[in-house]
Each structure stands twice: as structure tokens, then as C-alpha cells.
Image (spheres, rainbow, N blue to C red):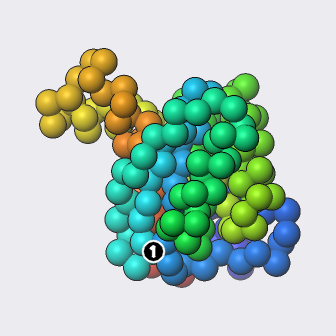
């Protein structure tokens, strides 16, 4: 019988294979960008993601210092990173940088790090903001954290679906 992991859109990337995903506790989700990183939070128990903040720092040192503050404050059990792909599922330059970011999260924090397809998260986030009357340039300060919320909600929905089909 094939493992259910072969069809899962979730990709665990930890170097230390003894780090196991636990489906309890707080989760931080990240929408990686070259200029900004959107961050969302949620609880496994509730399975609901909330926008948290947008990190507007470009140097890696500053980014990881800001993330370290969030990890200290929220004490997550899992980190989820959106994996940017082309619409036909191919990797591109930002995909490779995003994977490097995820590996750095793994190396720095030693927490389970999971990547999940984020192909339409920014478009979905923009549409959500339009629906509440925020459009155009007014979206910019919120867009990344709403995209992170979409990514994290996709993670919760995926694990909920996978657990219900076991």
C-alpha cells in the first residue's frame, strides 16, 4: 500500500530527520519575498490562520533576528513556508531562494519546517482585501501577511484532509 506522503503537497525539509512533525501547538507561516516576508500564526487545534506581521527588512541577519523574536514570543511547534512555483508547477529563481530561506529556518531554530505550494496565495490575498474595500496601493502594507495567512490556512486544510482520509 503506498504511503500517503507521496501525494502530499507538504514537503518537510529538515536536515535532521529525527525532527518529527507534531500536529499540536502554534504554527508560524511565512510568505517569503525578496523585499518583505509576510508572517501568519495559527494553532493546530483550531486550524485557523491569522495574519500577524510583515517583516520589511532585507538583510538576512535582520530578517532572522526579527524571526527569532517571533519564535521566542509565539513558541511555535512548526514553521510553514510557502513554496513559490510557476503556474505549471516549475521552480524559478525565487523558488531556490525560498528553499534556502526554509533551510536557514531549519538550521537556526531546529523546528519542523514544512513547505507548501503557494502558487495563488498572493492573488487570493489581494482578492480578499478587495472584498473588504482595500484595493490598489492601500493593499501593499497588508498583502504579504494576508498571503502568509492563505499559505498557513492551506497547510491546516491539507493536514486536516490528510488526517480525515487515513
Farthest residue in the left direction?
A: 133
Label 1: element kind: loop
Left or right of 78 in this view: 164: left
Above/below status of 164 relative to 36: below
Camera sees residue 77: yes
Residue at 42% x, 65% y: name it: 42
Q: Which residue is mark 1?
A: 44
Circle 1: is it few (<14), some (14-19), or many (20+) Cα within 10 Å? some
Q: Position of residue 74 (x, y in %)?
A: 50, 67
Q: Residue at x 40, y 79 (%)?
A: 45
The residue depicted at 58 percent of the width and 66 percent of the height is: 72
Question: Where does the image place residue 121, in percent across and percent down from the top left?
Answer: 44, 39
Q: Nearer the viewer, residue 57 or 36?
A: 57
Residue 43: image location, x then y, percent: 42, 72
Residue 125 x, y percent position in the rendering: 35, 37
Q: Is residue 118 visible?
A: no
Amino acid at each position: 500500500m503506498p504511503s500517503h506522503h507521496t501525494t502530499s503537497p507538504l514537503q518537510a525539509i529538515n536536515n535532521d530527520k529525527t525532527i518529527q512533525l507534531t500536529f499540536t501547538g502554534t504554527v508560524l507561516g511565512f510568505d517569503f519575498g525578496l523585499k518583505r516576508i509576510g508572517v501568519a500564526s495559527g494553532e493546530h487545534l483550531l486550524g485557523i490562520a491569522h495574519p500577524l506581521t510583515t517583516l520589511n527588512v532585507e538583510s538576512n541577519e535582520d530578517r532572522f533576528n526579527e524571526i527569532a523574536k517571533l519564535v521566542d514570543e509565539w513558541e511555535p511547534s512548526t514553521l510553514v513556508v510557502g513554496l513559490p512555483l510557476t503556474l505549471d508547477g516549475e521552480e524559478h529563481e525565487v523558488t531556490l531562494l525560498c528553499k534556502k530561506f526554509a533551510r536557514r529556518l531549519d538550521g537556526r531554530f531546529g523546528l519542523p519546517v514544512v513547505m507548501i505550494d503557494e502558487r495563488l496565495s498572493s492573488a487570493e490575498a489581494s482578492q480578499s482585501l478587495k472584498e473588504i474595500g482595500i484595493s490598489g496601493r492601500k493593499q501593499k502594507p497588508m498583502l504579504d501577511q494576508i498571503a502568509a495567512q492563505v499559505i498557513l490556512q492551506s497547510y491546516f486544510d491539507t493536514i486536516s484532509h490528510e488526517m480525515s482520509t487515513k
